[in-house]
Amino acid sequence: MPEITCYFSPQSGYAYLGHGRLRAIAREAGASIVWRPVDILTVFAEGGSTPPAKQSPARNAYRKADATRWARLRGLRFNTSPAFWPTDTIPACRLIAAAILDGQDPAELIGGPLEAGWAGDIQISDPAHLGRTAAPAGSYGARLVTLSQAVAAAEAVNRNTAEAVAAGVFGSPSYIVAGELYFGQDRLDFVAAHLAHLKEREGADGGALEGTA
């Protein structure tokens, strides 16, 4: 099964805009997603990127207009000036890492803080709020908050961040398919095309093997 490794920040507006599309692409291609929450400030620093909050007024004005277009295209609510942005993303990173270490598929969980920050004006650095975005209908969110405070969750985020930097990642979201890096949710069509190419090549290789059997 092909894999998409997704390096992301839980407060990345573009990760939010691309989250549903990425999952749909994976389903259509029969691919799995390897989710890797990262310390985005370290990724920015190591990759030589300027954090969006510190970019020029012109750059930020364009980012807001661009995000609005994508939100409209994807049918998502999107606040271009959320109340709690930027904020400390490490608690959310560790929560997601804890879910992965606990053997859970974190896809739905990841969507919680992303939507909370960009469509709900919720402070995702607050553990109480974060727990509710993780599991609004039950107690699992509170359990994850506890698990996220363990050393293992912190170490997992640190490993993810180091891996991202080593892979040449400089922003969120970034996707890697078969060793090829794609930055930004606006490159998801390329991700889908790469997966299709891998599937075609697998089929061709299989046909060749069958013909020589």
Image: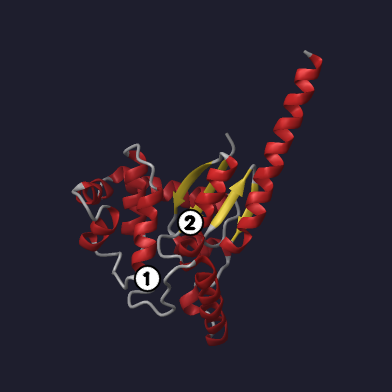
Residue 38 against residue 62 in the figure, above or below = above
Q: Residues within 10 Å of mark 2 (few under 14, many from 20)?
A: some
What quarter of the picture does the N terminus occupy? Answer: top right
Q: Residue 39's quadrant in the figure?
A: bottom left
Amino acid type at mark 1:
Ala
Amino acid type at mark 2:
Gly
Asked if one can make out residue 4 in the rendered structure from this viewpoint, the answer is: no
Query: What residue does disc 1 label?
Result: 119
Asked if one can make out residue 170 in the rendered structure from this viewpoint, the answer is: yes
Q: Position of residue 69 (x, y in %)?
A: 55, 75
Q: Position of residue 192 (x, y in %)?
A: 64, 50
- The disc, 1 or 2, on the residue closer to the chain's N-terminal end is 2
Query: What residue does disc 2 label?
Result: 20
What quarter of the picture does the C terminus occupy? Answer: top right
Secondary structure type for disc 1: helix
Q: Say which residue appears at 53% left-offset and 56% top-offset.
A: 21
> Is residue 122 rendered to the left or right of residue 193?
left
Q: Position of residue 26 (x, y in %)?
A: 54, 45
Taking the view exactly as shown, the residue that stands out farthest to the bottom is 57
Secondary structure type for disc 2: helix
Q: Say which residue appears at 46% left-offset and 49% top-offset.
A: 36
Residue 51 against residue 28 in the figure, above or below = below
Q: Nearer the viewer, residue 18 or 172?
A: 18
> Is residue 68 rendered to the left or right of residue 82?
right
Q: Say which residue appears at 74% left-offset and 35% top-offset.
A: 201
How far apart in space, not on screen, are marks 1 and 2 (Cα)?
15 Å
